[in-house]
Structure formats: C-alpha cells, structure tokens
Image: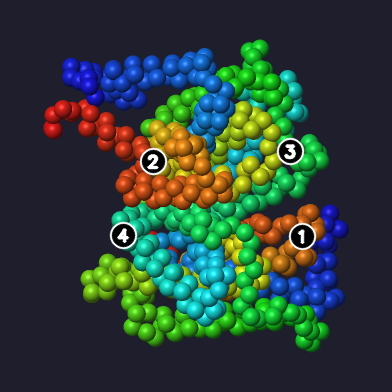
C-alpha cells in the first residue's frame, strides 16, 4: 500500500526533479501536441460562438484543407498559388455549407445540427479521398525538420516555426474579433442571434464568414500537422482529441481553447511518461477525457466559459 | 388506413391506453410479429439472417437503450460502444466462469454489469448537460476500451486478447458458438429484442417515462414540480446501459462469434447515435426503423453498382459509400428532423383519412 502511494505520489516527482532537461523536453513535446489540439479546438469554438453549432466536421475540414493543398502542390502549382487556391476552396466550402446544410436547418435543436455536421464529416471524408486519393502524402512547406540543442534541451525548428505561426494566427484572430466591424457583428450574433438580426446584422453573411474563418484555421492546422507527420486520414481523428480541450476551456472561449489545448497536451504527455508505466501505458487515449470529466464535476462551465445561469 | 376505426368505443382506461388502440392495428401487429419470427427462421437464407436480420435486431436493442437515455431523458451520450463492450466482456466472463448458467441469464447478468458501470459514468450528468455531457461520456468510451485491452483477465489471458463465444444451448438448441445455426440465433435475438421493446414501451408510457421527459424538456422546472433529478437521470443511465449491455453481449455471442475491443470502438457509438436520430428521438419504434435504415444502407450501396452493371474500383466505391451515407444523413435531417418514426406517423394519419382530405 505504502509503496503504491509512493509510486503514485512521490516517485514521479522525484523523477521530474532528478532530470529537469528531460522534464523540459517532455513539456515541450506536450506543448507541441497541445498546440494542435488548441488549433482544432479554436475552429470548434469559432463556429460554436457564432452559430451555436457544435461542428464535428472541423477535424475533417483540417484533413480536407491539407489534402487540397498537397494535391495542388503535387499538380505543380507554386506553394503560394496553391495556398491561395486552398483558401478559395475553403471559402467556397463555407458558402456551400451555409446554403445546403445550415439554412434549411435554422432553428432546429442543437443536437440535430450536431448530427448534420457528422453527416458533413462523412461526406467530406469521402469527397476529399475521392478527389485526392487516400495515400499518405508528404507536405513540404520549405521549413527543415531538423533539431538543434539550446541550453541542453532538444528543440525542433519546424516545431518552433509552427508554434510561432500559431501565436500569430491567434493574435490576428483576437484583433479581428475585438477591433473590426465584422468581428463586432460576430460577437453580437454569438450573444443573441435574434437581437442581432433585429438590428440588421445579416445572419447568413455572418455564418459564411465564420465558417470561412474556421476553414482558414483548418488550413493552418492542416499545414502544421501535415508537415510534421504527413497528410493522412488520422488527421481527422485529432478532432476527437480537441473535445476534452473544449470542455476544459469552455465552449465559448477563444483563450480557453488555447489554454485548454496546452493543458491537455502537456498533461497527457506528463501522465504517459511518469504515471503511464504504473498501469501498463497507452493512457494517452483516455487521459484527456478523464481529466476533463473530473474537471467538469467541479467546474461545469469550463475554465473560461461563461457562467451558466438558468431560470425556469 | 384502408380500414376505418369507426364504431370502436373505449369503455375503460386500459383499453384507451393500449399500445395499439385500434383492433385492426392489433391484428396487423400480431400477424407481423408472427411472420417476423417464423418466416425468416423457416426459409430465410443464411446471408439474410447473418448479415442483415441478426445485426439489425442487436443494433435495434442498443439504439433502444440509447434512445431511452438521449431521446427520453435528454442526456446526450457518446459512450454506447463502451457500455456495449462491458456487456460483451461481462457475458464472456460469466459464460466461461459458470459454464452451467443458462445463456439468457448470462445476457441479463451482463446487462446488469453494464448498468452498474453506466450508473458510475452517469454521475457527472448531475452537474453537466448537453454537449459537455456528450464529451464527458466519451471518457467512458475510451477508458473502458483501454481497460479491456490492458487487463488480460477480461479475455481470460488469451494471448490475442480476443474473446470467443463458447457454445451454449437453450432448451436443447445450440444458440451460441461456431456451430449454432443462424435460425436459432435469430430466434433468440428477436425474442430478446421484443421482450425489451415491450418493457421499454411500457416504461416510457408510465410514471418513469414522464419523469424522464420532464427532465429532458426543462430540468429545473421538473425539479420544482417534484421530479428528483438524481434518481431520474441515474435511472435513465442505468436502464439505458442495461439494454446496451445486453446488446453488447448479443453482439459478441449471436453476431460476431468472437471479438476484440476494436469491435466496440467509437464508430459503434456513432453508428448507434445515427440510428437513434435517423429513426426518431424519443420513439421506441424509431429505434427499430433507424437500426434497419443504418444496417440496410451500406449493404444497398455496396450492391447497387453491381446491380446497375457498373464496375468500379473498391476504393472509389468505399469513398462513394461514405459520401452517399453522409449525404443521406443530411437529407433526412433536412426533410424530417424528427426521424423516420415521425414520417411513419404522418403517413398513418394521411392514410386514416384517405381518400378524403379531412
């Protein structure tokens, strides 16, 4: 009994203190994974905030964006042109989704819209693979995937660039939401879409904008993930990992998505490395969900979510 | 319908509240029931029984379980696969630990085991609701699958981690194991499905069902008029996972024969959720219609190109299947968000008056 307590509560921390550089590397690995979760979660949050739709297809949108980009580059287009074309495709997709899926389903309960996005998920998966093929593709964006040592810690150039890009993206989004006219309109729709409609904010345009922005976030995520581990079907599975991130951070909070992603990423790496061996490993698959579950029992609205006030 | 119910007067509450209040409906239902039991068992081909009817009945039972939780009590769950896995593994453990136990009893016991697990994972629903709860139930999905994978005791230390249904008989007829005939397995599956469908139907019409629906429609208001949220929600979780557990046990014993944890992964949870939503949330009949739809569509899509004389590569066919499947889900949601059960209800209303407009 005592040795078990020791193994759970003391030994892992001794390990951490014993080798701080290893701990730092684990943490950096966790942050690298967490950043991806954050970005996918960010796409979720954007759409949930502006339309109340829980967009399950965000993961497939990431895959679709990455597939399109790689496919266009393979066709011989220069990277910049291919990127622009991909942006155009994602915006067109946003228009299509608004017209075909969202408009006929307006005012339906959230669960129906959630189901619709699962349908969309299947459709896009089949469509993307039909056009671009199902093979694993290498995405080369011109950043070398090489490592170097700094202060005794192993770092990776690609990871650093990706982290920088993510930070810039989040900053741009924050400015877009807080400072621009259309950003204000988005926040108004998020608060109360009927009130927003009544003061003349065009709901349809807002939806297209939001889904386009989520598409852009999907492109960024797809590029980073694809450059690291190739463009393949498993990309769409990171969507599932983004869900506990969402409930940790709160469905409606952009900073929550970022912080939640980093917590989940580092948490599951630390758990896997220091506590995983105790129970036979591979706890990465469920650690995030359990963390989120326990967390929710104490704080149902998430870290940064708005306090839920209910009246009869 | 073609018939008229004119002249059928109800003189007691019991006859007014019957499941089929119209005499003709009752006869049609009974005839259909008899046909469903006898016809496929007597002259159905093995392919039909094995690939369509048996999975349909098992999925329908699982969908019924999820429908009680999501459709009636309003608690969105994505952990169905996990609860079915509990049923499957519990049935395996019970059947191998007590070889003399009747297999039907084993199913019920494994259902109870799943119910206990469901109760534990239902506790967070007292604090959280909606999509937060849905994500929280994913924890059960991933954790349980991991547990069954990691702890070799659950598969009796089989090196491959596969659980195989042992051969068992009911009333002298072999119903599980490799030598059981599809007919016998079909009869067991339809019997179990009917018993629990009847049970569920009566549950949701009664006090318990009304409490669930009150919680679903407005939980705070329900609490104020005296519905206890703790008891009601946990009961929904318990009964729902009981049914899912039995479905999981059948899934291994009557359908797959042997299974790994892979069989119960997240896709299964989504599949059952599809059935519930396509079939109709909050409808017992809907669970069956949804299960039939989801089982039939892929088979239809796989065979349609051959029937049309088209030859296409397997990969392309797989992708087209995904697209059509996704497209159909979207189509049905847009046409009738309340599902197939609602469509059937509308048709029935129309037919009652036909050929008159009013």
Q: Quadrant of residue B104?
A: top right
Same chain, labels 1 and 4: yes
Question: Mark 3, chain letter?
Answer: B
SS class of the residue under badge 1? helix
Q: Is residue A126 left or right of residue B154?
A: left
Identify the residue position indicated by label 3 in the image.
B162
Identify the residue position indicated by label 1 in the image.
A276
Task: Name the front one of labels 3 and 2.
Answer: 3
Residue at mark 1 to residue at mark 3: CA–CA distance: 24 Å
Name the residue at 64% across, 80% down.
Answer: A142
Residue at mark 2 to residue at mark 1: CA–CA distance: 42 Å
- On the image, the x and y values in percent for residue B92 come to 70, 32
Q: Is residue B15 above or below residue A171?
A: above
Nearest the eye: B13 or B318:
B318
Colour pattern of the rendering: rainbow
Say few, some or many: other residues with alpha carbon within 10 Å of mark 1 (under 14 / 14 to 19 / 20 or more).
Answer: some
SS class of the residue under badge 4? loop
Name the residue at 64% across, 62% down.
Answer: A136
Residue at mark 1 to residue at mark 4: CA–CA distance: 47 Å
Same chain, labels 1 and 3: no
SS class of the residue under badge 2? loop
Identify the residue position indicated by label 4 in the image.
A103
Residue at mark 2 to residue at mark 4: CA–CA distance: 21 Å
Task: Say whether disc 1 or disc 4 marks the residue closer to the N-terminus.
Answer: 4
């Amino acid at each position: 009994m005592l040795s078990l307590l020791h193994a759970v509560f003391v030994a892992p921390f001794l390990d951490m203190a014993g080798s701080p550089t290893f701990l730092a590397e684990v943490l950096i690995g966790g942050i690298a994974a967490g950043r991806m979760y954050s970005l996918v979660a960010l796409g979720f949050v954007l759409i949930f905030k502006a339309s109340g739709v829980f967009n399950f297809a965000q993961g497939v949108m990431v895959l679709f964006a990455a597939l399109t980009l790689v496919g266009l580059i393979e066709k011989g287009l220069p990277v910049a042109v291919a990127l622009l074309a991909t942006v155009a495709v994602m915006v067109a997709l946003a228009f299509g989704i608004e017209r075909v899926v969202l408009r006929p389903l307006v005012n339906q309960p959230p669960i129906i819209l959630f189901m619709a996005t699962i349908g969309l998920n299947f459709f896009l998966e089949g469509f993307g693979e039909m056009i671009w093929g199902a093979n694993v593709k290498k995405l080369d964006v011109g950043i070398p995937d090489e490592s170097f040592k700094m202060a005794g810690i192993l770092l990776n150039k690609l990871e650093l660039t990706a982290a920088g890009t993510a930070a810039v993206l989040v900053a741009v989004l924050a400015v877009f939401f807080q400072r621009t006219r259309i950003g204000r309109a988005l926040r108004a729709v998020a608060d109360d879409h009927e009130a927003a409609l009544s003061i003349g904010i065009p709901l349809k345009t807002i939806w297209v904008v939001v889904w386009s922005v989520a598409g852009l976030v999907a492109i960024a995520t797809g590029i980073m993930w694809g450059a690291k581990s190739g463009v393949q079907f498993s990309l769409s599975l990171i969507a599932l990992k983004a869900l506990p991130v969402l409930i940790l951070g709160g469905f409606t909070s952009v900073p929550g998505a970022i912080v939640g992603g980093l917590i989940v990423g580092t948490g599951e790496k630390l758990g896997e490395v220091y506590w995983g061996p105790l129970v036979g490993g591979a706890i990465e698959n469920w650690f995030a969900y359990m963390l989120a579950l326990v967390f929710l029992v104490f704080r149902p609205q998430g870290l940064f979510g708005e306090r839920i006030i209910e009246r009869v | 319908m073609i018939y008229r119910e004119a002249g059928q007067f109800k003189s007691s509450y019991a006859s007014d509240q019957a499941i089929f209040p119209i005499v003709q409906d009752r006869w049609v239902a009974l005839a259909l029931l008899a046909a469903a039991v006898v016809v496929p068992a007597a002259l159905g081909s093995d392919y039909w029984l094995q690939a369509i009817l048996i999975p349909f009945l098992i999925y329908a039972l699982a969908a019924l379980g999820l429908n009680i939780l999501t459709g009636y009590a309003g608690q969105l769950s994505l952990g169905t696969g996990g609860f079915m896995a509990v049923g499957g593994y519990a049935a395996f453990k019970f059947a191998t630990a007590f070889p003399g136990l009747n297999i039907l009893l084993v199913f019920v016991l494994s259902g109870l085991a799943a119910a206990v697990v469901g109760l534990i994972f239902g506790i967070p629903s007292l604090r959280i609701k909606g999509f937060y709860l849905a994500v929280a139930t994913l924890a059960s999905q991933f954790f349980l699958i991991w547990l069954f994978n990691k702890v070799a005791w659950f598969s009796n230390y089989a090196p491959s981690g596969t659980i195989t249904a042992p051969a068992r008989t009911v009333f002298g007829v072999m119903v599980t194991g490799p030598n059981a005939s599809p007919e016998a397995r079909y009869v067991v599956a339809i019997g179990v499905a009917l018993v629990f469908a009847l049970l569920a139907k009566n549950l949701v019409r009664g006090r318990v069902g009304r409490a669930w629906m009150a919680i679903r429609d407005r939980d705070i208001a329900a609490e104020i008029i005296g519905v206890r949220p703790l008891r009601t929600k946990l009961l929904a979780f318990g009964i729902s996972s009981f049914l899912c557990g039995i479905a999981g046990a059948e899934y291994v014993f009557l359908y797959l024969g042997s299974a790994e944890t892979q069989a119960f992964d997240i896709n299964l949870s989504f599949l059952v959720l599809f059935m519930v939503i396509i079939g109709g949330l909050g409808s017992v009949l809907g669970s069956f219609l949804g299960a039939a739809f989801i089982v039939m569509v892929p088979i239809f899509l796989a065979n349609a190109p051959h029937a049309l004389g088209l030859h296409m590569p397997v990969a392309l066919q797989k992708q087209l299947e995904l697209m059509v499947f996704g497209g159909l889900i979207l189509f049905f949601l847009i046409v009738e968000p309340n599902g197939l059960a609602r469509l059937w209800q509308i048709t029935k209303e129309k037919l009652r008056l036909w050929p008159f407009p009013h």
